[in-house]
Amino acid sequence: MKEIKLFSPATVANVSCGFDVLGFCLDPIGDEMVIRKSKQLGVRIIKIVGQELPLETKKNVAGVAAEALLSEIDSEYGFEIEIYKHIKAGSGIGSSAASSAGAVFGINALLGFPFTAKELIRFAMKGEELASGAAHADNVSPALLGGFTLVRCGETPDIIQLPCPNNLHAVIIHPEIELKTADARSVLKKTIPLEKAITQWGNLAAFISALYTSDYELISRSLKDVIIEPNRSALIPYFDNIKEAAINAGALGSGISGSGPSIFALTNGEVTAEKTRDEMVKILQSAKIEHSSYVSKINMQGIQILEQR
Ligand code: HSE
């Protein structure tokens, strides 16, 4: 194989109760990337369409992730990367993760799959570190593996693939303002009162249990964030109103997608998802804030190969 074209999906990190450790993969939105072998060793980003992002390898998340992979393997080829961005940077649905994960997925495929998808996560995290100052894996893991994923942090992190109830749907509302992850991390407190930590880890554990048992009511009760959302929500205009609209429309819960400004909701079924989207969007329409919105099934596949030759 000389060249590969892929779809690298958007993702929702944190999912309210799982800051930096929980994420899931979306269906309808993602970047396309073309990656090809070249005689010139190393990594070159030769084209970026749709966003103003650096072509310089060491300043581009895809370049940094790709170099991390190549530093662990002897490759007789170099690689050229073209990125067709559809996910806006700073939108909160894993734009940098899609580029980082796509780059390592594509190069790994062109090299004949020397690494498993789980092994690629540590390379893709290098891109996240460049983008946000923190090497979190809660976007790159669902992008590479699909579905819901959980990260157990540690020197050798465990990445755990979680089941997903059949009827679970996601709504994403993206107010068209840019919120850099690094800025959204800078407002976070460094210490947590014990009672909040207890609430949060109970919610996370219950949410994961509910994924295993398809218990939508337990999903609803545990989709809460008492630690991060209270600090970050002020950065997102009309956040409380949009969340309230989602709950009133029948959503199981709603919260900040990743570091925002996108807001997600989870629903039991597509009909409720559409209704939830309509009600959430109305708040931004009446505030005259440009936005885009999506209804998505949970994408169980992750990155998808579109063409190869
Ligand atoms: N877990 C990260 C954060 C996700 O919330 O900062 C960033 O996309």
Image (cartoon, rainbow, N blue to C red):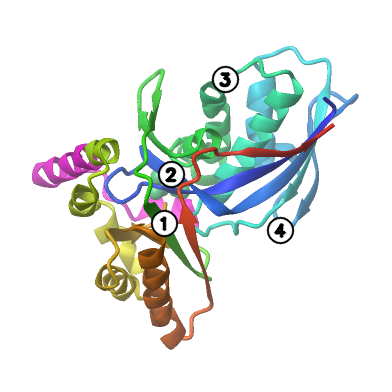
Distance in Å between CA atoms under marks 2 and 3: 19 Å
* Nearer mark to the viewer, of 2 and 1: 1
* Nearer mark to the viewer, of 4 and 3: 3
Q: Which residue position is annotated with label 2?
A: 24
Distance in Å between CA atoms under marks 1 and 3: 28 Å
Range covered by the magenta-colored residues? 180-207
The secondary structure making up most of the magenta span is helix
- Amino acid bearing label 4: Glu
- What secondary structure is marked by label 3? loop
Q: Which residue position is annotated with label 4?
A: 52
Q: Are marks 1 and 3 in contact (CB under 8 Å)?
A: no
* Nearer mark to the viewer, of 4 and 1: 1
Q: Which residue position is annotated with label 1?
A: 170
In the image, residue 159 lies at what x, y percent?
A: 41, 26
Q: Quadrant where the N terminus lies?
A: top right
Q: Are marks 2 and 1 in contact (CB under 8 Å)?
A: yes
In the image, residue 100 lies at what x, y percent?
A: 61, 38
Image: 230 above or below 33: below
Cβ of mark 2 under 8 A from ligand 1: no
Q: Which residue position is annotated with label 3?
A: 116
* Nearer mark to the viewer, of 2 and 4: 2
Drawn side of residue 179 relative to residue 189, left or right: right
Within-10-Å neighbours for mark 1: few <14, some 14–19, many 20+: many
Drawn side of residue 273 relative to residue 128, left or right: left
- What secondary structure is marked by label 1? strand
Query: Which comes before the other along the chain, label 1 or label 3?
Result: 3
- Amino acid bearing label 1: Ala
Distance in Å between CA atoms under marks 2 and 1: 10 Å
Query: Which comes before the other along the chain, label 2 or label 4?
Result: 2
